Image (cartoon, coloured by chain):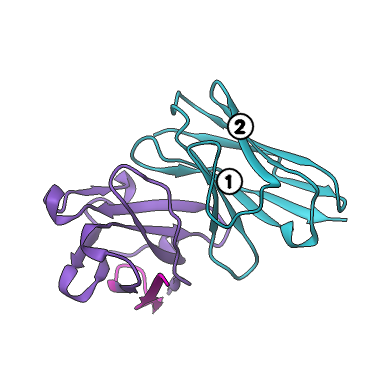
Chain colours: A purple, B cyan
Amino acid sequence: EVQLVETGGGLVQPGNSLKLSCATSGFTFSTAWMNWIRQTPGKRLEWLAQIEDKSNNYFISYLESVKGRFTISRDDSKSSVYLQMNNLKEEDTAIYYCTPNYGGLNWFAYWGQGTLVTVSS
Amino acid sequence: DIQMTQSPASLSASLGETVTIECLASEDIYSNLAWYQQKPGKSPQLLIYDASSLQDGVPSRFSGSESGTQYSLEINSLQSEDAATYFCQQHHDYPYTFGAGTKLELK
């Protein structure tokens, strides 16, 4: 059974940083491409970042609006993916999900329960 | 970025009815479209990918189709458990973008 467990969310002040983690099991993590997607309080879904697998040199893509503030990374030995978020803004308030996909098949069949990030002073 | 315009924003239908939800892509996405269902407090669940391929375990009353850059999700014989919000997503190009969602209520 595929499991994705996101952690690290919480209440943070604008300008501060937060690092999200996603522990996975039940699928071949090393060959999966991993994504972060968020859902705003208004229910809008927004894809944020993708990191490909080792065979693709861990190629990374970002949504332009988070490039330079967010950093995706992975640790294949721990079957985990991370999202470092810096200089957080109130509009970053959302539920953050990690999801896997396999090369070129860019739909998302598995989702975790998400972790809530609230950016507020 | 590819814009996905989803309609309607909400609809109400009765048990047993058939409903259609649409997404219009701002450019050709070559059938690279997925549909998701999300129930309150839950994560999105994949229904359809590649415009018309049914994800394993999804009831056959769900179907997807396309006409040019217009994509449709049809739900036949509505069941009570179909009450949810539905989203489309283009998986053709970065950044992958979603429609704004359609909230389906059962009368």
Chain of the residue on which disc 2 is drawn: B
Q: Which residue appears at 51% of the width and 59% of the height?
A: A40
Q: Which residue appears at 27% of the width and 57% of the height?
A: A32
Quick check: A50 above or below B32? below
Q: Which of marks 1 and 2 is nearer the N terminus?
A: 2
**Label 1, label 2: how many angstroms apart (C-alpha)?**
19 Å
Q: Which of B42 and B45 is in front in this view?
A: B45
Q: Which residue appears at 33% of the width and 65% of the height?
A: A88
Viewer can see residue A86: no
Q: Nearer the viewer, mark 1 or mark 2?
A: 2
Quarter of image, res B19: top right
Chain of the residue on which disc 1 is drawn: B
Quick check: B28 above or below B36? above
Is label 1 in a helix, a strand or a loop?
A: loop
**Residue occupied by mark 1:** B100
Quarter of image, res A73: bottom left
Say whether residue A108 is magenta: no
Instruction: Name the spot of residue B54 as percent of width and height, x first.
Output: 56, 46
Q: In this view, does B105 lie to the left or right of A48?
A: right
User: How many other residues sit within 10 Å of disc 1, few (<14), some (14-19) or many (≥20)?
Assistant: many
Residue numbers of the magenta segment: A1-19
User: How many other residues sit within 10 Å of disc 2, few (<14), some (14-19) or many (≥20)?
Assistant: some
Viewer can see residue A96: yes
- The quadrant in which the N terminus of chain B is found is top left
Q: Which residue appears at 28% of the width and 46% of the height?
A: A103
Instruction: Name the spot of residue A50 as percent of width and height, x first.
Output: 28, 53
Image disc number at residue B65: 2
Q: In this view, does A32 lie to the left or right of B46?
A: left
